[in-house]
Image (cartoon, rainbow, N blue to C red):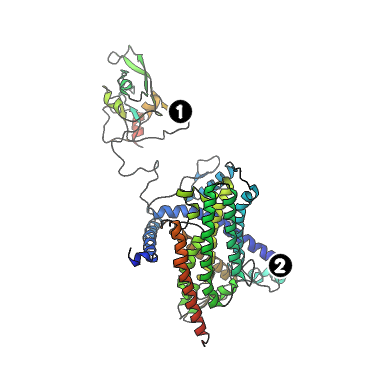
Amino acid sequence: MSWWERAYIFEIVRGLAITGGVFTRNMIKWMTGRKGALTTYYPEETRFDYARNNRGKHVLTQRPDGSPQCIACNMCATVCPAKVIEIEAGFDPDDPKHPKYPIRFEIDYSRCIFCGMCVEACPEDAIRMAKEVPALPSADRGAMWLGREELLGWQPAADPAKVYPVKAPAPAAAGAKR
Amino acid sequence: MTQDLVVYAVFIGYAIAVLMGFGTILTWVERKQAAVMADRIGANRAYIRIPFTQIKLVWWGLFHGMADGLKMLLKEDFKPKSYDWYAYAVAPWVVFTPVLLVFAVIPFGGILDPGRLFPSLAGWFDGRSYPMQIARLDAGLLIVFAFGGMTIIGAMLAGWSSANKFSLLGALRAGSQMISYELILGLTVLGLILIYGTLDLTAIVRQQSGVLLGFLPAWGVVHQPFAAILFLTAAVAENKRIPFDLPEAESELIAGYYTEYSAMKMGLFMFAEFIEIAIIGALFTTLFLGGYNLPFLTDAGFVLPGGREIPLSHGAVVVTQLVVFLAKVFIVCSFQILIRWSLPRFRYDQVLKFAWKFMFPLALGNLIVTAVIVWIRGGGL
């Protein structure tokens, strides 16, 4: 070290000037109503570079009449590495094209690893993953099981990366406005 | 007599409110300032919900201090099987109380004339006036050092009575470090005592009210800039904060002398540390930044250099002085927090070497130069 550095006080002044300068700059930004931080208030505010193809919460897509596109083939449940999907199939004689439908379709988000394999396995494009991750954390394991109605009814903001094949009816339109 | 009691009760209440307020606010200021310095947002999640509504008051995270206090109050008060439970129980108070007592001799405002402030009470007060200070002592500065030295005893007691090697090591470190820096603290102030010729803090502040060379405020920092730097450094070391936080270096000693303390006892140590920041701010303001003085502000109002006068009422002057004092204290506190979040910690041998081989000779040199100058100005041979 040179004597300048060993005298210590000059280097301290330099360090304080750097931190003080950053403080002043950020503080002026806050005072003038701008944001003086690089971090974000996470759930309320997402980063501008938040991944567009982020694998978030699952969506069950719908037919025009609002029934689930799922045919209860159990492919997603079979491929799921975390074994979190449970499907109970039902029989609908009135619809000869799609005689099988899910009575129960449940995902345990306490174990889901968000790998997206269910989406890839689905032959009917009935399950997808939206970008958004709603407030899933909970103190109650039971509350982390989401059922058919929640997955059908939850409509994330419009996803430009993936357009829904079928124009969803009223509830979806209301959801798209968010 | 009763008048004096009333006035001093008000002063004491004000002093306690100021210290507790600073202690609470500084925990928040420390968090927020550190965050802003590091491009972060800082504590912002604690809130108070107005009952029966969904309105959540966040107020920039001000409630985090309350949440901390509540946590400390509700935690289990764990006690070790120490061999001296009395010393263990009394140690936090030995640290905490002297810190509060130091403020008693610090003048936080000019002359208060209650009769002029409240004309309806003029008859009762009968023209009495009071310097705004709890105890006006001729040896005020000595009292500061006497009480300041007592916190060492608290730290040593805490470390010794915990029956824990980390605590004991922390206490030893605290003891040697605080004694070393206390010496430097005293030496730097000696120069000021030579210049002002008094130990009475009120008189010291009053001598700083003038103007030097027509524009410089006659503050201690102008007379003794070198001593001001040394004093602030030694005071930070005395408070055992980064970069001098060796007694509680968490990577080496867990929490040093308060390793075995939990709940509110540990909270008292922390609170004492934050109040001591404010005390250091108040002392530095009193000795070096002119106390409650603003340049050109007199008891009658502002007297500007051009001969222009802006008369202020007595109430306005008193309020200005109180606010000026608090603002200066806050700025010094904020500077200490800036230091704490900017500098890395010393090694232990460096701390003592820094004290004895670097600051001690500098403080002595400063004292000698000051003495020679004062001697020459006083007539020399």
Q: Residues within 10 Å of mark 2 (few under 14, many from 20)?
A: few
Q: Nearer the viewer, residue A26 or B319?
A: A26
**Circles 1 and 2 in contact, beta carbons < 8 Å:** no
Please say if B116 is above or below B279.
Answer: below
Q: Which amino acid type is shown beneath numbered disc 2?
A: Gln
Q: Which residue is depicted at the point 45% across and 58% down?
A: B349
Residue topped by disc 2:
B3
Q: Give SS at disc 1.
A: helix
Q: Residues within 10 Å of mark 1 (few under 14, many from 20)?
A: few
Please say if B81 is above or below A111.
Answer: below
Q: Where does the image place residue B152, in percent across and percent down from the top left? A: 57, 58
Q: Which mark is residue B326?
A: none
Mark 1 and mark 2: Cα distance apart in space: 66 Å
Q: Where does the image place residue B259, in percent across and percent down from the top left? A: 53, 47
Q: Where does the image place residue A33, in percent across and percent down from the top left? A: 39, 55
Q: Give SS at disc 2.
A: helix
Q: Nearer the viewer, residue A135 or B208?
A: B208
- Whether callout 1 and callout 2 share a subunit is answered no
Q: Where does the image place residue B126, in percent across and percent down from the top left? A: 71, 73
Image-based side of B248 in relation to B87, left or right? left
Residue topped by disc 1:
A141
Q: Is residue B271 visible?
A: yes
Q: Which amino acid type is shown beneath numbered disc 1?
A: Arg
Q: Nearer the viewer, residue B195 or B40?
A: B195
Q: Which residue is depicted at the point 48% across and 57% down?
A: B241
Residue A55 occupies quadrant? top left
Residue A99 occupies quadrant? top left
